[in-house]
Amino acid sequence: MKKLTVIMLLLLLLFSGSKAKALEKVPYSTYTYTYEGEPIESPHAFVPGRVFDTDELGLGSMREPEDIFVDQEGSIYVADTGNNRILILDNDFETGKSISGFVYEGVEDSLSRPGGIYVTLDGDIYVADTGNARIVKFTSGLECSQIIRAPESTMLPGDFSFIPSKIVVDKASRIYCVSRGNIYGVMVLNSDGGFETFIGAQKVVPNLGERFWRMFMTREQLKRTAKIVPSNYNNIVIDEKGFLYLTSVSSETSQVIQSIQTRSTDNRYAPIKKLNPNGEDVLFRNGFFPPAGDVKIEIAPRGRIAAAEVNYGPSFIVDAALGDYGTYSLMDQKRGKVFTYDSEGNLLFVFGGAGYQPGLFQKLSSIDFDNNSLYALDGMSGKITRFSITSYGEQVLEAIRLTEERKYDASVRAFEDILLKNNNFDMAHIGIGNAMIRRGEYSKAMQYYKNANDVSSYSKAFGYYRKEIIGDFILLIPLFVGGLFFLVSAFFKYSRRYNFSYTSQEIQGRSTLQEIMYGFHVIFHPFDGFYDLKHEKRGGMKGATFFLVCAVAVMLFKEIGTGYISSGTIRQDFNPLISSAVFLGIVILWCTANWCLTSLMSGEGSYKDIYISTCYCLVPMILLVIPSTILSNFVTEQELMFVSFITAVGFIWTALLLFVAVMTTHAYTLGKNIATIIFTLVGMILIAFVMFLFVNLIGRMVTFIQNVYNEVTFRI
């Protein structure tokens, strides 16, 4: 009996332990994004704690709540929209009050579908009474002290409708109101409810196609064309300094996706803006991607039903919550996730999701911070989830605090501790790099920025490092540059004399050196050069092949030797065989397509002539890509234009030579030559497509034969 009792106790303890572990399990993954836009998991920064239903206090369950606000005392205010009331809860969810009906100036009144709530430092409660198209102000004693209806002003547009949905109030008692259907920006009212102005109006810029078609439309057609209207703001938050954070959802889905994928800092389609008192957007967007929620976005295929759209398209940002030290969180209602950023726009962590477990949401409606706790309101279930910060999350905030307070040595130690838990946290590498720059340790800062793939910061550190290194050799640089120009000039003078002496002699056989040296004559005298290349046999297969091999080697050198600032990424998947095959394939495709076409268009050049002239056209590219690649290792981000210019000159020069080579080799007129080149490019695409089909067909045949062989051997 005793043995049985012991066994039962052990089983009970085991079951209890496994149950505790199950409860501790977080139902979502916390992650960030790499520079390439791939999600990478990180330790949890926030974990779900208590999930509260107001029915526990006898207040009944909430219906379609739309807004949550936590004041400085920790009291929680909820706009219980479906029940036409405001709920006030204490921080421990032990007591609760409600505001629904009230008396103002002796008249009984009530709220109707309140959509937003804001509480001032003095305890005044402002309610966006959306259903009644007004703003209602209550004292800390829950007595109605003011009702603000639609203001009257000659400055208001005739089509303006006052339907306040979200509001905030600054320290001067100015009211900032987001009104439904308002395309003019945020409405600013004085403390008496009088209209002052609109700020932060969304800009509308038609795309190139719309501009093009509008040029040919009549006035009547323009009137019938749907007007392009700016998107509305859907929420507003104010910080202690009076800056406004505004969220919106743009109807231009493709433009939003494009701005994310191109890492654009343009705010036209940005779902979050930070307005200063003048209405200017001053939000920093210095992260890998602009603050816009999800980065890895899938496009919905045609025919998808609306219910499935939650899996596709950009995030649906409908609220923001302000944390400590300049951090802020954006709420994605579409996927039930929270994205937290620092003041520079770097993504710190993402958590949450859609579902029914604690920490997941059926329809996330609003979020707000209280110290290090995040309160999230589910508009479908009518429940409030309190998220608690973890030790990892506290370390991240502490490192940001130390950086903000310019305690760089301490911030380095804090970021190093973070890297012990999450070595993939790019923000930590960037934070250490920033501290290293302030210490004057530029080479170390460069390495940390490189670990985070932060090219701009790397360039800044490299500029300081370069200045430090070349300071002792500054007088030698002009001598080096002058000597280099002298050598280049001397070489081209020698090649000119060499080619001139060669033309003055009757030489039966051409040496390889003579064929190579003639390439430096062709690039400066293309018409005469290509004519003599074909008719006087000044060049040949050996020289052409030499230049082709050099061009392949130069392209490989460009792939391998381009500086990190210029390439913008660390090459880890470089395959020299594939790169060589691609370049050789392009040259062969050009020669083949041009020969096939010119054979039908009375071209005078043979395949050999086309090959030789094409390879000789590569000389400028060879000569200019080499120095531009070397130079790319010694320039900053602001100086890259010089490297790009040198490279562009090389390729444009090669293209011009190719144009002259085709015209001279085949004895074409200008118009016929242009048409030939265009059709040659089209022919290259067709040949490549046919080759792809052929290779694919061969692959399928091999697979079929292999399957038949396996089936036969299996049966035998």
Image: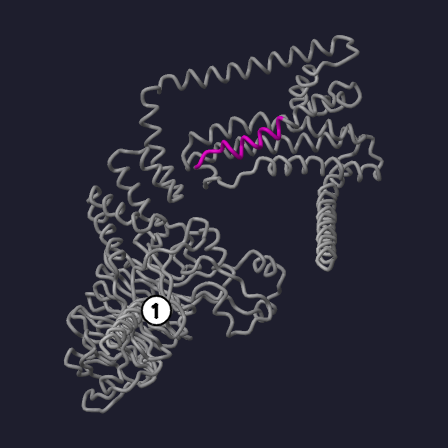
User: What amino acid type should be assigned to the residue bearing mark 1?
Assistant: Asn
Question: Badge 1 is on which residue?
Answer: 235
Q: Residues within 10 Å of mark 1 (few under 14, many from 20)?
A: many
In the drawing, does residue 311 fall left or right of residue 360? right
In depth, the one of 454 and 46 nearer the eye is: 46
Residue 381 coordinates in the image, percent (x, y): 35, 79
Residue 55 found in image quarter: bottom left
The answer to whether residue 194 is visible is no
Is residue 552 shown in magenta?
yes
Residue 26 found in image quarter: bottom left
Residue 163 coordinates in the image, percent (x, y): 35, 77
Is residue 676 shown in magenta?
no
In the drawing, does residue 665 fall left or right of residue 211? right
Position of 265 relative to 184 (above/below)? above
Position of 210 relative to 661 (above/below)? below
> Which quarter of the image is occupied by the N terminus?
bottom left
Residue 27 coordinates in the image, percent (x, y): 36, 67
The answer to whether residue 445 is visible is yes
> Which quarter of the image is occupied by the C terminus?
bottom right
Main SS, magenta residues: helix
Residue 405 coordinates in the image, percent (x, y): 19, 48
Q: Secondary structure at mark 1?
A: strand
Position of 36 relative to 540 (above/below)? below
Q: Which residues are magenta?
A: 550-564
In depth, the one of 577 and 535 nearer the eye is: 577
In depth, the one of 574 and 222 nearer the eye is: 574
In depth, the one of 261 and 556 nearer the eye is: 556
For the point 28% across and 85% down, the residue is 111
